[in-house]
Amino acid sequence: MNLTLCMPELAVLGLALIVFLGDLLTKDGQSKRFLGWVCAAGFTAILAAVLCLPADKSAPVAFGGMFLGDGLARVFDVLFLCGALLASLASIDYLDNKGVRWQGEYYFLLVMVTAAMMAMASAGDLLTLYVALEFNSLGFYALVSVLKGRSLVSSEAGIKYLILGSLASALLLYGISLIYGLAGTLSLQGLGSWAQTAAMTPVFSIALLLMIAGFGFKVSLAPFHMWSPDVYQAAPTPITSYLSVGSKAAGFAAIIRLFPGVFQNQHAVWVHLFMVLMVLTFVWANVVALKQRDLKRLLAYSSVSQAGYLMIGVIAGTAMGLHAVLFYSLVYLFTNMAGFQVAQLLEAEGTGGEIAGFAGLSTRSPGLALAMMTSVLSLAGIPPFAGFFGKYYLFAAGMQAGLDADRFWLIGLVGFAVVMSIVALFYYLVVVKQMYIEPAHTDKPVHVPVAAKLALTLTCFMVIVMGVYPTPFLDWLKQALP
C-alpha cells in the first residue's frame, strides 16, 4: 500500500482535523473568522506541495487499485485546492455579514467536500467513485442550507438539491449495479479489459444511459440541470461559486475516466448520447439566460452552457481534447469565482442579486467594475482573456478530431457551439452595459474587505495571464498527461 500517493488527500483530512479542533477549543461567543484564514493558509500550503510533486507517468495505484495517483488526479487536485482556497477567502467576511453562528461546521464541511472531490478524481473503481461522490454531495447539501435560520429560500434550495440529487444518485447506482452484473468487477482496469470485447447488449446500453444521467446531473447538462438556477441563487454565494466549478470539475473527472477511458470501444453509443445532451444544453441554457434579471441565476445558466463547451473535448476523445478540457476547467475556475466574488460584495451592500444593482458600478468602484468585466468577457470568450483561448483550444480539439477520425459531424457540432457563443455574448454584455452605461443609484463606493481583495486579485491575475501567455499552463498539462 503506497500511502505517499494519498498525501494530498491525507493533508486535506489533517486540515479538517485542525479546523475541527480550532472550533472545539474556541469559546462560545468568540469570533471564529480565524478559521477561514486557517483554511486559506492550509489550502495554500497543500497546493504548493502538490505543485512541487514530480510528475509520475507510470499510473501508480494504491489500496489494491482503488486509488489512482496519476497525472489526471493531480491536475484535478490543483483545481480543487485553488477553488477551496478562493472559497475560504470569500467566506470570511460573508459569514460575519450574514451572522452565521456555525462557522466551525461550515469550514469543516468545506474542507471535507474538497477531500471528497479529490477522492473522486483519484478513484480506481466504481465503488470508490460512488462513495466519494455521495460524500461530496452530502456536504454540499448541508452547505447550501447553511443559512436555514435566516433564509427560507436557502432551506428550500437545500431540500430541492437533496431530493433531485438523491434521484440522480439512484440512477447512477443502478447503472453501476448493471455494469457490475455484466462485467463481474468494479475495478476501472478490469472494466476496461472487459469492455474491449463486450457486446453492446440492451442491458449494457441502459447501464451507460443511467450513468450518463447520473453524471449529467453532477455537471449540469440539460435536462438534468433543473436544480442549478434555484440552488445557485439561494445558496451562500461562496458556496455557489465553489459548487459551480468544483463539483462540475469532479463530475468531469469521473466522466473522463469512465467514457473515453474505460468504455472507449463503446464510443458509438455514449458519444451520440452526450452529443444530444450537449446540443440541448446549449440551446436551453443560452436562450433562457437571455431573460434572466438575477445575476446568480444568469451565472447558473452560464454554468450550464459551460458544461456544453467542456463536452466537446470529452466527445473528441483525443489527448488534445483532454488537455483542452483540463485547461478550460482551470480557466473557468478563476473566471467564475471572480464574477461571484463581485456579486457577493454588491450583495453585502444591500443591492440584492439583481443585475440592475450593478448600475453605475464603474463610477462607484472602478476596480470592481473592471474585475466583473474581466470575468464576464472571459466567460463570453473575448480576447485577450483566458476564456477566449480556452474555447479556442476546445474548438480546435473538436475540429482536429473531426478531421482525423472522419467524424465530420463533430465539425458541425463545433460550428454550432461557436454560434451559441455569439448568442451568449448578448446576456454577458447586459452586465457590462449596467456597469458602464447606466447611471449609478448612489455615489457610495463598495466596501471591499482584505480577504475579498486578495481573492479578486488572484482570480483576475490568473484570467489575464492564462489568456495572454497560456504556454506554461499547457506545458504543465502535457507533462502531467502526455
Image: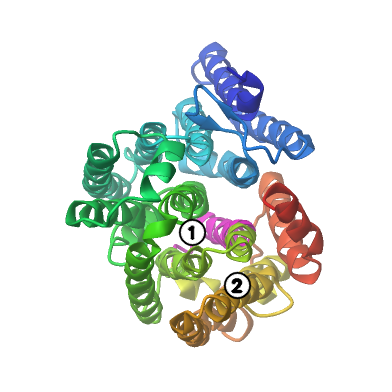
In the image, what residue type sits under mark 2?
Ala
Res. 191 mark: none
Q: Which residue is mark 1?
A: 350
Q: Which residue occupies 30% across, 51% down?
A: 211
Looking at the magenta stretch, what is its main secondary structure?
Answer: helix
Q: Which residue type does callout 1 highlight?
A: Gly
Left or right side of 145 for 90? right
Image position of 276 (left or right of 177): right
Q: Nearer the viewer, residue 164 or 4?
A: 4
Crowdedness near tag 1: few (<14), some (14–19) or many (≥20) residues, C-alpha within 10 Å: few
- Is residue 359 something that shows in the picture? no
Mark 2, other Cα within 10 Å: few <14 / some 14–19 / many ≥20: many
Q: Position of residue 154 (x, y in %)?
A: 33, 47
At horizontal 22% and vertical 38% (from top left) the residue drawn is 181
Whole-percent x, y for residue 78 in the image: 65, 43
Image side of residue 371 versus residue 104, left or right: right
> Callout 1: helix, strand or loop?
loop
In reply to whether residue 20 is colored magenta, the answer given is: no
Q: Is residue 4 above or below residue 152?
A: above
x, y percentage for residue 259? 42, 54
Query: Toward the viewer: 13 or 374?
Result: 13
Residue 299 position in % (x across, y down): 46, 66
The residue shown at (28%, 54%) is: 199
Circle on res. 397: 2
Write down the region rendered in magenta: 330-353
Residue 336 in view here? yes
Badge nearest the viewer, 1 or 2: 2
